[in-house]
Amino acid sequence: MNEAKVDYQFIAYSGAVHAFTNPQAGSDPSKGAAYQAAADRRSWEAMKLFFAEIFKK
């Protein structure tokens, strides 16, 4: 990405594993998929900011 001079952002949410936005994924991250409420909220806000940026009128 850097070599291609692409504008990108990498966001990692501490403690979040696969399916962290799905409340039905359970609560045991050791299984590889688990809901993480804080990461869910933060990622939703980040997505809205991203969409606002790329879909400017």
Image (cartoon, rainbow, N blue to C red):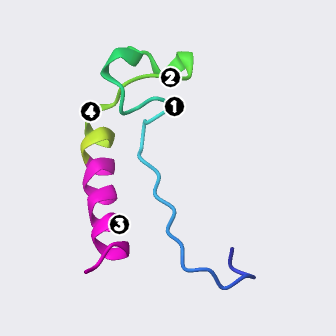
Asked if residue 46 is positioned above or below residue 25 in the image, the reply reads below
Q: Earlier in the sequence, mark 4 or mark 3?
A: 4
Compared to 21, does 10 lie above or below?
below
- The mark lying in front, picked from 4 and 3, is 3
Magenta stretch secondary structure, dominant: helix
Task: Kindly state the secondary structure of the residue where label 3 is placed.
Answer: helix
Residue denoted by label 2: 33
Tell me which amino acid carries mark 1: His
Helix, strand or loop for disc 2: loop
Along the horizontal axis of the image, is 16 left or right of 53? right
**What mark, if any, has residue 37 been given in the picture?**
4
Which residue is disc 3 drawn over? Answer: 50
Label 4 CA crowd tier, 10 Å (few <14, some 14–19, many 20+):
some
The mark nearer the N terminus, 1 or 4, is 1
Position of residue 40 relative to residue 2, above or below, is: above
Which range of residues does the magenta coloring cover? 42-57
Q: Quadrant of residue 2?
A: bottom right
Asked if residue 27 shows in the view, the reply is no
**Contact between labelled residues 3 and 4, with CB atoms less than 8 Å apart:** no
27 or 19: nearer the viewer: 19
Which quarter of the figure is the C terminus placed in?
A: bottom left
The Cα atoms of the two marked residues, 4 and 3, are separated by: 20 Å
SS for tag 4? helix
